[in-house]
Image (tube, grey):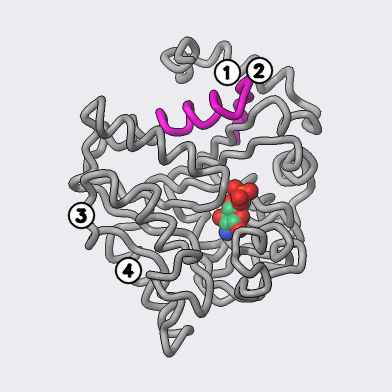
């Protein structure tokens, strides 16, 4: 794992978008794993901008989202399918047929979860998985006690997650209490992970995920097991990390980061 600290949330989102764009340019048939949430909206805005102004081409790209609320139809404004269409898919040249999210209103949810796993496998697996982190420490909707080897399944949301996301619903009480989420094991199989966390409210949980002991209580800690995981944070989110001097040294000196250093 490497942790990259950027001065502001804008810088962190910009670096994240650039890494995704470079990965798409390097492999036009890339399979992206995508995330939702407030943190990602700016990343998607930047990708749309790169599509419109820098010829970033998504025509051959396939995507799989991490999760979807149980009980929300794709056309529901609070569904993650709606979020993705609105923030990204409708604004770039991706083939809608190549975009996948779990179907939150499937009659047989277990079968939907199994099929989602099969679909990912059928596409050859996820090349680059974008991730945020929830205040409960979740990646996707892998709430505390999610097995490190878990697969796509239905998960009950914690009161903390409900408190975090209910304000986005009208009325807030209408927020579903369950979601379909890729499992921690599913996420760990992606070839590269890219986590973005910004803001001081993420500082505590981020430090636990990145530097704390491995624990199913914080599914984000599982990323410590991933062979190629980059965590991008802004200064406020980095305030609880202990090894910041080392992380800064890596960004300033590792050749891999050369071309990204002067990009702000
Ligand atoms: C959501 C999603 C996660 C997301 C996280 C952070 O509930 N299931 O995939 O990373 O919580 O959300 P936000 O960026 O709004 O803080």
* Label 3 – label 1 distance at C-alpha: 35 Å
Q: Residues within 10 Å of mark 1 (few under 14, many from 20)?
A: some
Residue where numbered disc 2 is placed: 248
| Image quadrant occupied by the N terminus | top right
Q: Give the magenta range.
A: 1-19
Residue where numbered disc 4 is placed: 119
* Label 4 – label 1 distance at C-alpha: 36 Å
Residue where numbered disc 1 is placed: 251
198 and 258: which one is in front?
198
The residue most toward the front is 171
Query: Can you say whether 168 is above or below 70 in the image?
Result: above
195 and 264: which one is in front?
264
Q: Position of residue 70 (x, y in %)?
A: 52, 77
* Label 3 – label 4 distance at C-alpha: 16 Å
Q: Are marks 1 and 2 in contact (CB under 8 Å)?
A: yes
Q: Residues within 10 Å of mark 2 (few under 14, many from 20)?
A: some
Q: Is mark 4 within 8 Å of ligand 1?
A: no
* Label 4 – label 2 distance at C-alpha: 39 Å
- Badge 3 or badge 1: first in the primary sequence: 3
Residue where numbered disc 3 is placed: 95
């Amino acid at each position: 794992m490497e942790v990259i600290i950027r001065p502001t949330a804008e810088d962190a989102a910009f670096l994240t978008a650039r890494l995704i764009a470079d990965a798409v340019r390097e492999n036009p048939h890339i399979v992206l794993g995508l995330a939702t949430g407030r943190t990602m909206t700016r990343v998607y805005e930047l990708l749309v901008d790169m599509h419109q102004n820098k010829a970033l081409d998504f025509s051959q790209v396939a995507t799989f989202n991490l999760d979807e609320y149980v009980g929300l139809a794709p056309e529901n404004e609070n569904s993650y399918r709606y979020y993705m269409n609105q923030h990204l898919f409708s604004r770039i040249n991706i083939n809608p047929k190549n975009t996948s999210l779990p179907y939150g209103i499937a009659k047989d949810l277990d079968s939907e979860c199994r099929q989602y796993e099969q679909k990912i496998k059928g596409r050859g697996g996820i090349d680059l998985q974008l991730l945020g982190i929830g205040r409960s420490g979740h990646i996707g909707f892998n709430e505390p006690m999610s097995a490190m080897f878990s697969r796509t399944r239905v998960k009950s949301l914690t009161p903390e997650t409900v408190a975090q996301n209910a304000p986005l619903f009208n009325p807030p009480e209408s927020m579903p209490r369950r979601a379909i989420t890729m499992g921690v094991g599913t996420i760990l199989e992606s070839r590269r992970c890219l986590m973005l966390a910004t803001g001081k409210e993420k500082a505590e949980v981020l430090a636990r995920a990145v530097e704390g002991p491995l624990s199913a209580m914080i599914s984000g800690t599982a990323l410590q097991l991933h062979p190629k995981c980059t965590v991008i944070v802004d200064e406020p989110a980095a305030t609880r990390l202990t090894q910041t001097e080392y992380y800064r040294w890596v960004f300033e000196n590792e050749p891999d980061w050369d071309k990204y250093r002067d990009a702000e």
